Image: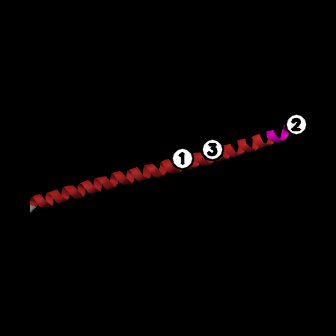
């Protein structure tokens, strides 16, 4: 009976350790996601600004009259 209890205790301890590890990993992944989301937003803003500048420059180019 003691050996069964010890085995069960070891399994529970292992499950607790895995849970802690998965929580830490989840926390880290959420932080990475937030960082990448912010970076993506900044890049989208830069892209929109570059597009606007290019469009403004294209409007300044005279059209060829044929």
Q: Which residues are magenta?
A: 57-66
Please tell me whether residue 61 belongs to the stretch shown in magenta.
yes
Distance between the Cα atoms at labels 1 and 2? Answer: 44 Å
Which of the two labelled residues, at mark 1 and mark 2, occupies the earlier sequence position? 1
- Crowd band around label 3 with a 10 angstrom C-alpha radius: few (<14), some (14–19), many (20+): few
| Quadrant in which the N terminus appears | bottom left
Would you name the residue on which mark 2 appears? 64
Q: In the image, residue 38 lies at what x, y percent? A: 58, 48
Would you name the residue on which mark 1 appears? 36
**Mark 3 or mark 2: which is in front?**
2
- Res 16 → quadrant: bottom left
The outermost residue toward the right is 65
Q: Secondary structure at mark 2?
A: loop
The outermost residue toward the left is 1
Residue at the image position 41 percent from the left and 53 percent from the top: 26
Q: Secondary structure at mark 3?
A: helix
**Mark 1 or mark 2: which is in front?**
2
User: Majority secondary structure of the magenta segment?
Assistant: loop
Q: How is the image coloured?
A: secondary structure
Q: In the image, residue 29 lies at what x, y percent? A: 45, 50
- Crowd band around label 2 with a 10 angstrom C-alpha radius: few (<14), some (14–19), many (20+): few
Residue 58 appears left or right of 27: right
- Res 60 → quadrant: top right
Residue 23 appears left or right of 44: left
Labelled disc at residue 43: 3
Residue at the image position 63 percent from the left and 46 percent from the top: 42
Q: In the image, residue 57 lies at what x, y percent? A: 80, 39
Which of the two labelled residues, at mark 3 and mark 2, occupies the earlier sequence position? 3
């Amino acid at each position: 009976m003691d050996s069964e209890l010890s085995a069960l205790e070891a399994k529970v301890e292992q499950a607790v350790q895995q849970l802690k590890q998965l929580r830490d990993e989840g926390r880290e992944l959420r932080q990475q996601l937030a960082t990448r989301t912010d970076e993506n937003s900044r890049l989208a803003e830069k892209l929109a600004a570059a597009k606007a500048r290019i469009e403004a420059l294209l409007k300044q180019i005279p059209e060829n009259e044929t």
